[in-house]
Image (cartoon, rainbow, N blue to C red):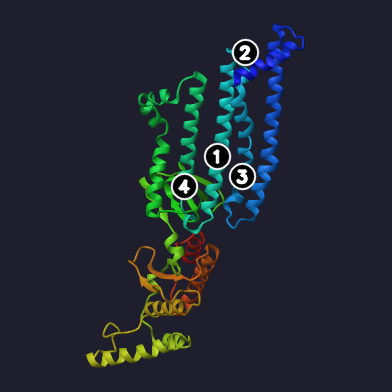
């Protein structure tokens, strides 16, 4: 059929009086013009008829997947296949009189067709990834890693076909030689392979997700995860900088994921203040009378005094010596006050651990630790709640004749020296 059409066109040109040596080039020019018009016609059909029909269908469908395909111009890119494919089919007719030129044109057509296919597949994968990310199940899954791997595979296959087109060999011929360079490929794609395996473990064990607050001290990362890729994980730090952490670091190294705290009922407050040991003493009647004026302490003091008096009477304790029997201390009352204060605080979660405890005494004094959970887990609000609690405790400690320890400064030494003189 191709040969008959070529002979017919050649005879028609010769009948017009064109010399035989020139008729071959005239024939080539006519066929090229026909091919150009055919390609433009097919492109017009693809752009104005097929694409418009697809856009109408996409706008009326319930799913948003086709909308993403339109948004990422998948159908627009596919429309280029029609003219390229037409040229691929008819190139043997156009260049039948130029056997040396035909393989070059055929290879060039194959390269363009390969580029259009890869270009369209890339846009399709982007649309599919965006569609899956919009689904609740895949919301926090590192699916971007898998799509990056798919793209790498597609590009590798495309490179194999590209080389096979350029050297004129079958792709199978190249694939047989991959075994010999597999060690080199493994070395080149070491991070990719490690990242892929790490992504699988992260997804299966739900170790981290996009939006999680993580701390990875080895890489200076402390913030929320922006993106989980095949090779790296992007973390937006609290100082607005971006840290890039290798994906496999979340498998090989230790890190902290604060998701448990964010999903729980509160954020932990664990902080202590140091009480000067020299100010710790037994509470006398005057101090107790003064502290009874504090509303949340009054019931505790009244019940505690009765309990202590009954105990001392039972043990027949000699009250002339404070070391005998039981007595209230200013540090004990203050510890109880701090406990009652955080229990009554509206921003402290009453369903989680609340505790005020003494730690091992140090050279800086007696540490009194506040342990509780803030209802508000937002960083700024949490810091405000914690500061309010300790502002109050620092200020109220003087009411208990207690002094919060502070290391002496230069002015303290200067004042002491002046008093001595």
Label 3: few (<14), some (14–19) or many (≥20) C-alpha neighbours in 10 Å: some
Q: CA distance from mark 3 to mark 2?
A: 42 Å
Residue assigned mark 1 = 122
- Coordinates of residue 375 in the picture (x, y in percent): 48, 71
Q: CA distance from mark 4 to mark 2?
A: 68 Å
Looking at the image, is mark 1 or mark 3 earlier in the sequence?
Answer: 3
Residue assigned mark 4 = 220
Q: SS class of the residue under badge 4? A: loop
Front: mark 1 or 4: 1
Report whether 98 appears left or right of 328.
right
For residue 273, what is the image quadrant?
A: bottom left
Label 4: few (<14), some (14–19) or many (≥20) C-alpha neighbours in 10 Å: some
Q: SS class of the residue under badge 1? A: helix
Front: mark 3 or 4: 3
Q: Tag on residue 72?
A: 3
Q: SS class of the residue under badge 3? A: loop
- Coordinates of residue 83 in the picture (x, y in percent): 64, 31
Looking at the image, is mark 3 or mark 2 earlier in the sequence?
Answer: 3
Task: Look at 42% across and 56% down and name the residue there.
Answer: 257
Report whether 150 appears left or right of 115.
left
Q: Tag on residue 320?
A: none
Q: CA distance from mark 3 to mark 4?
A: 36 Å
């Amino acid at each position: 059929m191709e040969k008959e059409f070529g002979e017919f066109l050649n005879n028609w040109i010769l009948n017009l009086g064109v010399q035989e040596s020139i008729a071959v080039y005239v024939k080539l020019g006519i066929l090229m013009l026909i091919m150009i018009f055919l390609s433009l016609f097919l492109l017009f059909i693809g752009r104005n008829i097929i694409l418009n029909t697809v856009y109408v269908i996409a706008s009326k469908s319930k799913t948003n997947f086709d909308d993403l395909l339109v948004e990422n111009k998948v159908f627009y890119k596919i429309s280029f296949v029609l003219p390229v494919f037409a040229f691929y089919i008819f190139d043997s007719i156009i260049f039948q009189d130029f056997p040396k030129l035909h393989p070059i044109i055929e290879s060039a057509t194959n390269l363009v067709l390969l580029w259009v296919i890869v270009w369209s597949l890339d846009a399709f994968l982007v649309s599919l990834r965006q569609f899956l990310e919009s689904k609740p199940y895949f919301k926090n899954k590192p699916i971007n890693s898998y799509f990056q791997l798919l793209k790498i595979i597609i590009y590798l296959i495309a490179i194999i076909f590209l080389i096979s087109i350029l050297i004129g060999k079958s792709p199978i011929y190249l694939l047989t030689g991959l075994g010999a360079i597999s060690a080199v490929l493994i070395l080149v794609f070491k991070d990719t392979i490690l990242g892929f395996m790490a992504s699988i473990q992260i997804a299966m064990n739900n170790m981290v997700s996009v939006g999680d607050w993580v701390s990875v001290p080895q890489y200076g990362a402390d913030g929320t995860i922006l993106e989980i890729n095949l090779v790296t994980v992007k973390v937006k730090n609290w100082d607005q900088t971006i840290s890039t952490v290798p994906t496999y670091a979340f498998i090989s190294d230790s890190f902290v994921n604060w998701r448990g705290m964010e999903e729980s009922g509160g954020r932990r407050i664990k902080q202590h203040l140091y009480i000067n040991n020299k100010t710790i003493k037994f509470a006398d009647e005057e101090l107790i009378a003064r502290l009874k004026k504090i509303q949340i302490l009054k019931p505790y003091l009244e019940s505690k005094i009765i309990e202590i008096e009954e105990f001392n009477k039972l043990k027949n304790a000699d009250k002339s010596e404070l070391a005998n029997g039981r007595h209230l201390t200013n540090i004990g009352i203050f510890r109880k006050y701090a406990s009652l204060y955080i229990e009554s605080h509206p921003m402290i979660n009453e369903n989680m651990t609340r505790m005020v405890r003494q730690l091992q005494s140090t050279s800086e004094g007696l540490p009194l630790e506040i342990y509780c959970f803030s209802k508000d887990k937002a960083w700024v609000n949490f810091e405000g709640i914690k500061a309010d609690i300790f502002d109050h405790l620092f200020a109220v400690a003087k009411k208990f004749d207690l002094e919060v320890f502070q290391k002496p400064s230069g002015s303290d030494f200067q004042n002491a020296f002046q008093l001595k003189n």
